[in-house]
Image (cartoon, rainbow, N blue to C red):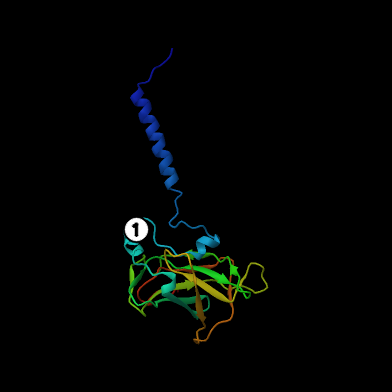
Amino acid sequence: MTVRRPARLVAVGVAALAATVLLTACDDVKYTDDKPGDPKASAAGATVPNDPMAEQAAGSRCKSDEISATVQLKGAGSALLTIKNKSNHNCTLYGYAGFGGLRADNSADALTANRDAHPGPATLVTLKPDKAGYAGLKWSACDKSDASCHVLTGLQVTAPDETTPVTAEVLGTDGKPVSQLLVSAAGLTTGTLQKSNDKVLFN
């Protein structure tokens, strides 16, 4: 005997199945749109996805040609990133800076840049001329002879929502330029950009 099901019940069943598939797909969505180890994603700065504040920041964001960057070592595997507004007008930072490595021959090193909401969520940082925003950096050192070790002679920094990097001045704990930085295969981890350097360093 053939059982006929009402068309409405069939439609409800199909809709429920589609909703289940959609929810399952959403579970796979990551917090950021980059993939660890992807040089393009690592080098690009990023705002926080689906955040209304990101739209407000986008219109006044600091462009690559308006900033300078300094990375100062604060201890083994720890550093402070400073992004300064060198333009003559206000601009904003919101989210995370991107990073790329430079080798001795000035070629790019595909350095992984991981992101950690430290010391807290992203906040809109408005920079007046000659003022700066800050973020913490951490990494694990490595043996120079290890094939997976990143032997860097410089770092490039990209402001949020920008794709063109600027070459950062890398300074040691003594304030003098650093000629070499050894970073393990895991790469760098950066925190959110903040208006103060208080508590931005990783412990």
> Label 1 sits on what residue type?
Asp
The tally of labels here is: 1
**Quadrant in the picture for residue 198:** bottom left
- The residue singled out by tag 1 in the image is 51
From what the image shows, is residue 27 above or below residue 111? above
Q: Position of residue 35 (x, y in %)?
A: 51, 57
Q: Is residue 89 visible?
A: yes
| Residue that appears at 41% across and 69% down | 63
Query: Please, is residue 177 above or below residue 78 in the view?
Result: below
Residue neighbourhood size for the residue with mark 1, other residues' Cα within 10 Å, grouped as few (<14), some (14–19), many (≥20): few
The answer to whether residue 81 is visible is no
Query: Residue 140: x percent and y percent?
Result: 55, 71
Quadrant containing the C terminus is bottom left
Indicate whether 42 appears above or below 78: above
Asked which quadrant contains residue 124, the reply is bottom left
Whole-percent x and y of residue 126? 32, 72
- Residue in the foreground of this view, choosing between 168 and 136: 168
Depth check, front residue: 154 or 186: 154
Q: Secondary structure at mark 1?
A: loop
Which quadrant of the figure has residue 200? bottom left
Residue at the image point whose x is 34% and y is 64% from the top: 59
Residue 137 at what x, y percent from top left?
47, 72
